[in-house]
């Protein structure tokens, strides 16, 4: 259940913040700045207000990118898990086929119509089984690697892309700027 109090966003874990929490934080900060600013108007407070707006815009972008990255990682994890399960099923199938072949060879030795397997064919089956086991281990290691390293590399590229997109935005207003402009117009 969501907290209805805007100040409660300050108590959340930073990795659980949403864009709406950033809006709540900006609302609380804006409210406090309105209390601090005098009716005459202090240029220092006004400059500080614009700097805070910029920091909150960057914070909002980072929160959005973090949430997208988390979703991408969840999808990648699901894909890797499905691939691991598929490889595991293939391994079990190959293993059971090998066991069945060995059982038939040992049980039906007296049967003149039994299928005859060469030693080379049995080696190929065992080799294929071992390759599938190796692939399974590689996929499991890759899954662990993605879990550990993808987050840190994505965060670095997110910051770089954010800096590039912020420079190209120019006069585009974000929700936070609109909120502060609206508050300023209503409180002369």
Image (spheres, helix red, strand yellow):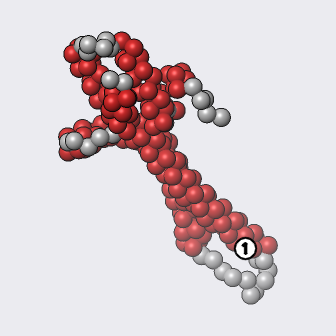
Looking at the picture, tell me which residue is in the foreground, 72 or 110: 72
Q: Quadrant of residue 58?
A: top left
40 left or right of 137 in image: left
Q: Is residue 44 above or below residue 68?
A: above
x and y percentages locating residue 97 in the rendered image = 67, 69
Q: Is residue 66 visible?
A: no
Q: Residue at x 49, y 32 (%)?
A: 21
113 left or right of 173 in image: right
Q: Which quarter shows the N terminus?
A: top right
Q: Is residue 45 visible?
A: yes
Q: Residue at x 42, y 40 (%)?
A: 64
Looking at the picture, tell me which residue is in the foreground, 104 or 60: 60
Q: Secondary structure at mark 1?
A: helix
Looking at the picture, tell me which residue is in the foreground, 67 or 26: 26
Q: Dot 1, how many residues are within 10 Å of its Cα: few (below 14), some (14-19), or many (20+)?
A: some
Q: Is residue 67 above or below residue 98?
A: above
x and y percentages locating residue 19 in the rendered image = 45, 37
Q: Quadrant of residue 92?
A: bottom right
x and y percentages locating residue 54 in the rendered image = 29, 29
Q: Quadrant of residue 188?
A: top left
Q: Is residue 160 above or below residue 114?
A: above
Q: Residue at x 20, y 42 (%)?
A: 170
Looking at the picture, tell me which residue is in the foreground, 88 or 39: 39
57 left or right of 166 in image: right
Q: What residue would you read off at disc 1?
A: 105
Q: Residue at x 78, y 77 (%)?
A: 108
x and y percentages locating residue 144 in the rendered image = 50, 42
């Amino acid at each position: 259940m969501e907290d209805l109090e805007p100040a409660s966003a300050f108590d959340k874990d930073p990795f659980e913040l949403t864009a709406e929490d950033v809006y709540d934080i900006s609302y609380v900060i804006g409210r406090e700045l309105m209390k601090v600013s005098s009716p005459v108007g202090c240029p220092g407070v006004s400059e500080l207000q614009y700097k805070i707006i910029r920091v909150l815009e960057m914070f909002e972008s980072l929160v959005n990118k973090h949430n997208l990255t988390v979703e991408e990682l969840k999808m990648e994890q699901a894909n890797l898990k499905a691939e691991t399960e598929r490889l595991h099923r293939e391994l079990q199938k190959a293993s059971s086929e090998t066991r069945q072949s060995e059982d038939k060879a040992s049980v039906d030795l007296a049967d003149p119509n039994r299928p005859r397997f060469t030693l080379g064919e049995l080696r190929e089956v065992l080799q294929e089984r071992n390759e599938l086991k190796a692939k399974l281990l590689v996929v499991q290691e890759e899954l662990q690697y993605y879990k550990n390293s993808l987050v840190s590399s994505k965060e670095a590229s997110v910051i770089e892309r954010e800096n590039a997109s912020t420079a190209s935005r120019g006069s585009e207003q974000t929700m936070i700027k609109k909120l502060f402009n609206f508050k300023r117009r209503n409180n002369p």
